[in-house]
Structure formats: C-alpha cells, structure tokens
Image (tube, grey):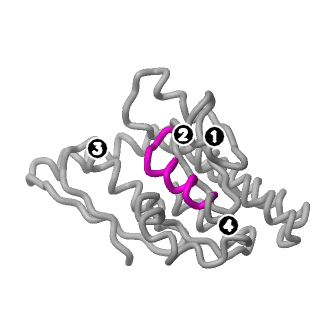
Amino acid sequence: TALLVESWLTHIARLQATAQPAFRFAEYLDDYLLDPSSTLVVGISCSGNTASVVNAITRAKQRGATTMIISGLGDNDSARAAHARITTMAHIEKEANVSAYSVSHLFLALAGFEFAIMLGKATGAVDARCASDLRDELEFALESLSCLPDLFEDMGAVASELSSDAIDTMCALGTGPNTGTMVEGALKTSEFCWMFAAGEEL
C-alpha cells in the first residue's frame, strides 16, 4: 500500500516521496528524516495499532516532522501519536473475522489516492480538470473489473494446469507505478497458496 501511495504522491502531487518499512524507517531515522521540519511522515495501518508504525510515527514527531496516519475507524495508538489522521473502512475485514486484509488494503490505497489529489491541489500541481480526469480514470479502472467473473474461470483453468505440474514457487514482476501491485500480488500468492512468492523489480 505504501508503494502505491508513494507512486501517487510523486506522479499526481509531484512531491518527492519514498515508501519505507516502518521498522526500517524508525531504526535508521537519521538516514531518512534529513529535514524534519519540511517532511510529512505518513503511517499506514489497517488497525492503527501496528507497533512498528506507531513507533515510527512517534519518533518522527519527536524529531520535528509532521505526522499523519491512514487507518481504519476507532480509537488507536497511531491516531493518538500522529498530528493528523485519515480514517477509512479498513477495519471492515476485522469486523467480519477475515484475516487476509485484501479489501482493507484497497480502502487504505484509495485514501492515499485521494490524499495525493488533495495535496496536488494545495501545491498547484493539480487543477480541477486534472483532478476530475484522475477520478474518471480510476472509475474506468473499477468499471473494467466487471470482466473478473469470466476471468476467474480462465484463471482457474490456468491454476489447475500449474498445480498438476507441482509449481511451488512464483516470481511476480513489476516496475514503476506497478511496483506496489507486484509486491501485493506476491504477498497474496503466499497467503492464499502457501507457496514461496517473491516480488521483483523488472
């Protein structure tokens, strides 16, 4: 999700952005937080209670950075630690007692997309026409998903063929704005298929 948000902040808002794992960011804070007073640190967590995210937000705030969390609803540790918060429906799968968090990821990502448009408007990188075009492109992408029921049947046939060949490892490839999608694809393959799946830069 952070990789997707990074791509939107750079492409849409035209801001320098980098996605880092929360633990790495907190442990090597001096290497990433070079100018705290002009840096916004955005934590992303479904529950808002991910310990590494809370720690990263807390340490960045102590160093003088502006901090924000994108999370699900409800009281949580990162919301108390951050300066600002964007709430989403990312908690919906927890309420349904589902552990894969596929839908939650989409809520968090869409919040990042809208945030990039809002920041772009604030900095002058995005005007009303551009914002409308970006949202139209997103709607077109979502409408295109109507092909999924038929596609699932085709994918099922491919999956059966691969299973018969005893495939136990997968490598997902991607680059640029598709890097986040590639990593998510590898993650979901690991979660659902219990096989080794790696996401790699093209």
Mark 3 or mark 2, which has the lower sequence index?
Answer: 2
Is disc 1 in contact with disc 3, using a CB cutoff of under 8 Å? no
Q: CA distance from mark 4 to mark 2?
A: 21 Å
Which mark's residue is nearer the viewer, 3 or 2? 2
- Residue 105 x %, y %: 51, 44
Q: CA distance from mark 1 to mark 4?
A: 21 Å
- Residue nearest the observer in this picture, 159 or 131: 131
Reading the image, the residue beneath label 4 is 9
Is disc 4 in contact with disc 2, using a CB cutoff of under 8 Å? no
Residue drawn at x 68%, y 64% as measured from the top left: 64
- Residue 32 x %, y %: 53, 74
Q: Which quadrant is home to the C terminus?
A: bottom left
Q: Find residue 48 and name its label.
A: 2
- Farthest residue in the top direction? 96
Task: Characterize the local packing of mark 3: few (<14), some (14-19) or many (20 or more) Cα atoms within 10 angstroms.
Answer: some
Mark 4 or mark 3, which has the lower sequence index?
Answer: 4
**Could you tell me which secondary element the residue under label 2 belongs to?**
loop
Is disc 1 in contact with disc 4, using a CB cutoff of under 8 Å? no
- Residue nearest the observer in this picture, 5 or 144: 5
Reading the image, the residue beneath label 1 is 79
Mark 4 or mark 2, which has the lower sequence index?
Answer: 4
Whether 55 is among the magenta residues is yes
- Residue nearest the observer in this picture, 108 or 127: 108
In the image, residue 161 above or below residue 131: above
Reading the image, the residue beneath label 3 is 191
Task: Characterize the local packing of mark 2: few (<14), some (14-19) or many (20 or more) Cα atoms within 10 angstroms.
Answer: many
